[in-house]
Image: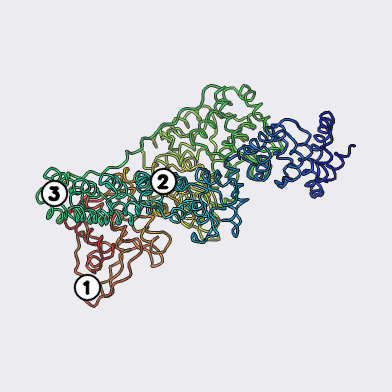
Amino acid sequence: MSALLDAVREGRVRDVPGLVKPLDAAERKAELAELKALRTEVRSWGWDRWQGRIRTLDALIVAGAGCLTGAAATVAWITARDLRDGDRTPVGELVDLLAGREPGWLGDVAHRLAARASTAELDYPLIESLAGLARCAMPTTEPVVRGWVTAIGHRHALRHNLLGDRHTPVMVPRLFEAVATPVPLLWYDDPEDPGQWPQALVAVVEAGVVERPVMVTGCVERLLRTGRPGELKFFLSLLGALDLTEGERREHIADWIGMAADAASPVAGYAQGVLSELALSGALPHRALADMSASVLFRPEKKLVRAQLVLLGKVLRAEPGAAGDLLPVVAEAFGHEDTTVQERALKLVARHLSHVDPALYEELAKRAGLLSPVHRDLAVAAFGELSASAASGAYEEILPPVPTPVPMAPAPSDLAELVEDVTALITSGRGNVGNDWSPPLGTAEFERTLDGVVRHAHRDRTALAEGLRETVADIPPSRPVGGDGDARFRPTGFITVAAAVLGETPTGSPPSLEPSVERPACGHQALRNVLLARLREAAGRLARAEALPFLLATPTWVTGTLDTDVLVDRLAEYHRLGVDAGPLDFAQALIRLPRGADPAAARAAAALGTPEGDRLAAWLLGDGVTAGSVVGTRPPSDDQEPGGQEPGGHRAFPQPLAWLGRPKRDRWMPCYGHRVPEDALWMSVLPQDRDVLAGWLEAETRNALKEVARTAGAATWLLSAAERDGPAGPALHRALACALVVPRAEDRLAAVDALLVLAARGDLNGRSLGGELAGLLIEGQGKANRLTDSLRTAAATGAYRTVWSVLRAALPELLPPVTGAPRRPEAPGTRTAASPVAPSPVAAGSDAASPGGSARHGAIRPGLGELLAVAADCVERCRDGGVPPGLVEFAGRGGSSQAVRQAGRLLAALRTGGDHSTP
């Protein structure tokens, strides 16, 4: 063993340069082979040798770099992940050993190191040293810039380091070009502190190290690219510290306008301030001010909108001749969603109408038709008959089209196609229905594939088994489907069915192929248990080689619904072939039938003369069906086990479906972090009982309301429920109310879609939903601003009357009470004080007088003004009548709050509108 290899193995990194330098090319090549072998050996060293491992790796880096001759190979060795234990690099020893190489080679190595994104930041000291030895340009890749910032950024010496570092002139401009701002730049608490980055960079400019235009332009361009809040704050602080001159501000007028239009709120506010100063000094052209205003007036930040209107007013007072350029853009705010903005814009236009020509006057008058009716009197005063003639046409509610049922495609008739489908489900994990981590599986995939396996097994079991043999063999015992050895990921679902065709039971699956009766932990698991039980029942019959031509429960529609005549025909074929119906398969088929008595189909079923035909006939005549639902009619006591009976005490369902016969238990464990992958598949279990399903799945949405759910999608099932049949009862409206106020915007959007579909189908109960929403806000389980966002989104689609039907029911409980006023009567069956209270029945258009002067007013609920604004907007458009109880008293209480102003606007709209029926 050589002295060099001994030193490397022992980790004597300081000795390595002296041992490598005397070696010639042949000796270095020989040593390199030994070093590579040692490198492989070190990989196998255990953690008990971690200290020696670190020292040996450092020595390996130096020795290998010294023995290699090519620049690319040297860089690959230095940056190798297995050699960089702890990301350490022995910079001094490397520089000592490589210093004797050619300058061109050293520069090549430095630039190659700089191009390695994963290590360049840590290797900055080495890169700087090699570039210095090569006397070449310093690399300025983004990782190198970050390394420079870290190396130079000592707080108490930052200014001195920046002014004295030879790389500052090239590195500082790169700070503004980096995709991600180096983190140390953001570590400051006082932008006025000379020892922190903003003021230190200003000192660099003042000293002439970096030209001032480079710094100013860099800041402006970086703000235009937007970024994280901390990054934007830093560059705004730097601009403030630079104290821009008027010339510098004028030079970037187009940039300020772009920021005011599209940048984040703090940046837009800064740009608006700069442009305001330029406008008031006469340095901003009127057309540029108009372009800026057209964007700012429709930003969501009310502070920016108000400031812009104030600026326009100041400019118009100073230069009345600018009215021709500025008033048209002000008039665009007549269509703003905030009536306060509309009022400010109208008053501003009215003050300067004398400075416009007749053509512009007429154009402004036409735009006055966009104003809310609450401002119509003021508009008439300003424009006369021109604004009064801008009357809107008849209102038409716009709702999405009712979803058209999609028929279920038949099972694959081609054997190769079926085998391919089964294989795809098993290998992708989508067919592993029994765990939460499987990819989503659609109803059509599940039902068509399962029915296809049964049909082909009946037709030619040998051919099907041969086609599936390789698929089942590819699932080794050591690697269960869908997981990495965890027992929760045992093979379930379609692998069980496929193995049953071969007469086998796959490793890790339950020993029995009979339907499981395990107690579900939550509603989702209960629904999945039904799906798994159907798979196991089919697998059990296949394993026993029973004659089974097809399944009874395969739906005829993708929603999961099964047509009655189809089931009658299937039972007739079973009777002809002498096949016994699977208990669970037949029970699932019954539950999927459309609700309602069907005497003709009942007679056809009874004519079969079989027990299943008789039961189907009784079912179709209403036996066991209560209020259109098959489950959840009478809750058992807490200590009572489910009896597995249909409502009304008739024949028992199989055990997996008997769990569905019991209402959801609130004491179930919530599904924390559940990602809801199978909404449609769950819905297919009870396609005619969406309110019952809502009662089971409501916990998911309520968890999201409490911000318990860690993933999005807690409300996506609502749209599937809205598209299905069955009563839209209290549970569905309660879940919808929760979803409309959950924190996640994507879940609220899904709830809005469900609301609109329910309304389009005529299934939305505005009074019920409004009462639930009011209760959530009263209990503090939801925030009014989230509800406002949801309802405004729904109204913006054209469903103003639908949204008003909801708000009209919610407002009586959200308006603050007036002490001394007559107590509003409660409707029978309304909630207690701890629960949402349904609005009491009051005559439409009630304008009861407000209480006497001794009455006191309650506190205004946060966000009430925004809700009232949405309500007023809806009524002004749909012209629906019916004054909610308490609105007259609240609107008459006086004051300048937004809630009171919007209540007055709503009351005026209701009194001038018609009295139409709501959805």
Residue 713 drawn at (x, y percent): 48, 46
Residue 663, can we see it? no
Q: Between disc 1 and disc 2, whose residue precedes? A: 2
Camera-nearest residue between 794 and 333: 333
Give the residue number, with chain letter if any, for mark 2: 750
- In the rendered structure, the answer to whether residue 508 lies left or right of residue 912 reads right
What's the amino acid at mark 3?
A: Ser
The dot on residue 670 is none
- In the rendered structure, the answer to whether residue 877 lies left or right of residue 567 reads left
Residue 156 drawn at (x, y percent): 60, 60
Give the residue number, with chain letter if any, for mark 1: 851
For discs 3 and 2, the disc positioned in front in the rendered view: 3
Residue 586 drawn at (x, y percent): 50, 38
The image quadrant of residue 534 is top right
Camera-nearest residue between 101 and 444: 101
The residue most toward the front is 208
Residue shown at 67% from the left, 46% from the top: 125
Residues at marks 1 and 2 touching, judged by CB atoms closer than 8 Å: no
- In the rendered structure, the answer to whether residue 236 lies left or right of residue 908 reads right
What's the amino acid at mark 2?
A: Ala
The residues bearing labels 1 and 2 have C-alpha atoms spaced at a distance of: 42 Å
Disc 3 is placed on an element classified as helix
Give the residue number, with chain letter if any, for mark 3: 387
For discs 1 and 3, the disc positioned in front in the rendered view: 3
Q: Residues within 10 Å of mark 1 (few under 14, many from 20)?
A: some
Q: Name the image colouring.
A: rainbow
What's the amino acid at mark 1?
A: Pro
Residue shown at 62% from the left, 37% from the top: 115
